[in-house]
Amino acid sequence: MQVAQTQSDNYMSQRDSLKILYDDAEVRLDSITGANNSLQGDKSALQKQIESNKAEIRRILNDKNATAADLKRARTMIADLNNQIASLEAEVSRLTGENQELTANNTQLTTEKQVLEQNLQTSSLEKEALAQTVDVGSTFSASNIQITPVNEKRSGKEKTTSSAKKVDKLVVSFDVENRIAKSGPADMYIMVTAPDGKVISDASLGSATLTTRTEGDKPFTTKVPVEYEQGTRKAVQFPIRAADFQSGDYKIEIYHNGFKIGEGVRTLKKGGLFG
């Protein structure tokens, strides 16, 4: 009877020690399972095997009729479980390192992306500024501006006159040039302001206006197309006609690319010599 009691005590002591070993393993496992799930997402094959082993160990430890052989088998499985947990810890450590490396790489890529975007923005601004500089720099300059009042005879001959009532047209001439402007067509806009302050308008253009760079929209008299050859000086000449020329000052302004590039004044008198 004493022997049976001793065997029973030994059996219970063995079961309790196994349960303590199992509980320690489970606590150790719980501390790393959550981290592994967050790093890897779905449960790994190792975790699934561990859960299967845990279930079998719990079954044996909870079985009041478990034999000594069952308990021996449970001890072996707990040892295996601890080995599996060690492998899982190593896996978590590896994944943590990879995650930190990915985070560092992502941070570097984000920084490089920001630098690239900043460089692209700077490049775009520089390109825009350069284009603006080239655009402004390609504006023509006008020189040698002359305004000649002309009387047209019935015979077809033309004569310079000083008398406003005899003037049939104002012949405007000037030279344009630009060192960087490419060869091709360019439009010159001419504004002729009569002594009464009104801009002479071309009936064929109607109430045409030009958008200038600094003065807003302004009415213009005519648009003169010029076929320009790069690096040369181009002479331009055209007539300005009106139903009636008044005595007084006629102001001629020349615009290109939205900028005023030249102006001149011609005075017509009621009579006498042209001055």
Image: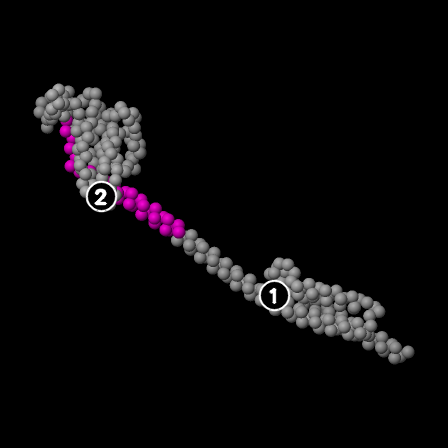
> CA–CA distance between discs 2 and 1?
73 Å
**Furthest residue toward right:** 1
What's the residue at 12%, 25% (across, down)?
A: 158
Quadrant of the image for the C terminus?
Answer: top left
Q: Provide the residue span drawn in magenta.
A: 120-149
- Using the rendered view, name the quadrant where residue 1 is placed: bottom right
How packed is label 2: few (under 14 Cα within 10 Å), some, or many (20 or more)? some
Q: Position of residue 179 (x, y in %)?
A: 22, 45
Residue matched to label 2 = 230
- Percent across and percent down for residue 226 are 23, 36
Q: Of residues 105 and 179, which is closer to you in this image?
A: 179
Magenta-drawn stretch contains 123: yes
Between residue 104 and residue 71, name the one nearer to us.
Answer: 71
Which secondary structure lies at badge 2?
loop
Looking at the image, residue 43 sits to the left or right of residue 267; the answer is right
**Percent position of residue 109, x then y:** 47, 58
Earlier sequence position, callout 2 versus callout 1: 1
- The answer to whether residue 230 shows anywhere in this view is yes
Q: Is residue 162 visible?
A: no
* Mark number displayed over residue 92: 1
Q: Amino acid at mark 2?
A: Gln
Name the residue located 19 percent from the left edge and 38 percent from the top edge: 234
Give the residue type that dot 1 points to.
Answer: Val
- Circle 1 SS class: helix
